[in-house]
Amino acid sequence: MRRFVIALALVGALLGALLGVGASAVKAGQRHPSRPIWSHVVAPGETLWQLARSAAPSQDPRRIVDRLISANHLHGGSIFPGQRLVLPR
């Protein structure tokens, strides 16, 4: 039951991020000031791979994971619940 609830929360968070619910549009401050980025707060159990597949289902998730790592100045692929991640659209 607990796994089902976690899976349901993950699906809701990912759909919300894709639809802009719960995500906030902000201006990118460095490379493209006029290009919006999305912001996502990591839910328990989420991985960069899951976020990459949800954010860009038609693209190679490895490229998106690399962009997430780079954009968020991560060291490796570890993320934690409550962490805010950004990804240029």
Image: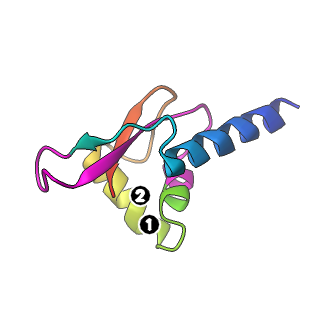
Q: In terms of depth relative to the viewer, which is nearer, 35 or 62?
A: 35
Closer to us: 45 or 77: 45
Mark pair 1, 2: CA separation: 5 Å
Q: Is residue 50 left or right of residue 66?
A: right
Q: Position of residue 83 (x, y in %)?
A: 42, 30
Residue 5: x %, y % from top left: 79, 32
How far across and down, in percent of the image, does residue 47 sit?
54, 46
Which amino acid lies under the numbered mark 1 shown in the image of this protein? Arg
**Which quadrant of the figure contains the N terminus?**
top right
**CA neighbours of label 2 inside 10 A, class few (<14), some (14 to 19), many (20+):** many
Q: Secondary structure at mark 2?
A: helix
Q: Give the numbered dot on residue 47.
A: none
Disc 2 marks which amino acid? Val
Q: Residue at point 36% right, 52% down?
A: 68
Q: Residue at x 32, y 43 (%)?
A: 75
Q: Secondary structure at mark 1?
A: helix
Residue that carries the numbered disc 2 in the rendered image: 65
Give the magenta-colored segment's residue range.
28-51
* Residue 44 image offset from top left, x and y in percent: 60, 31
Q: Relative to 68, say whether 43 is above or below.
A: above
Q: Which residue is mark 1?
A: 62
Q: Is residue 9 left or right of residue 29?
A: right
Q: Nearer the viewer, residue 8 or 27?
A: 27
> Does the magenta portion include 53?
no
Quadrant of res 67: bottom left
Q: Is residue 32 left or right of residue 62?
A: left
Tag 1 near tag 2, CB within 8 Å: yes
| Residue displayed at 69% across by 35% down | 9
How many numbered circles are shown? 2
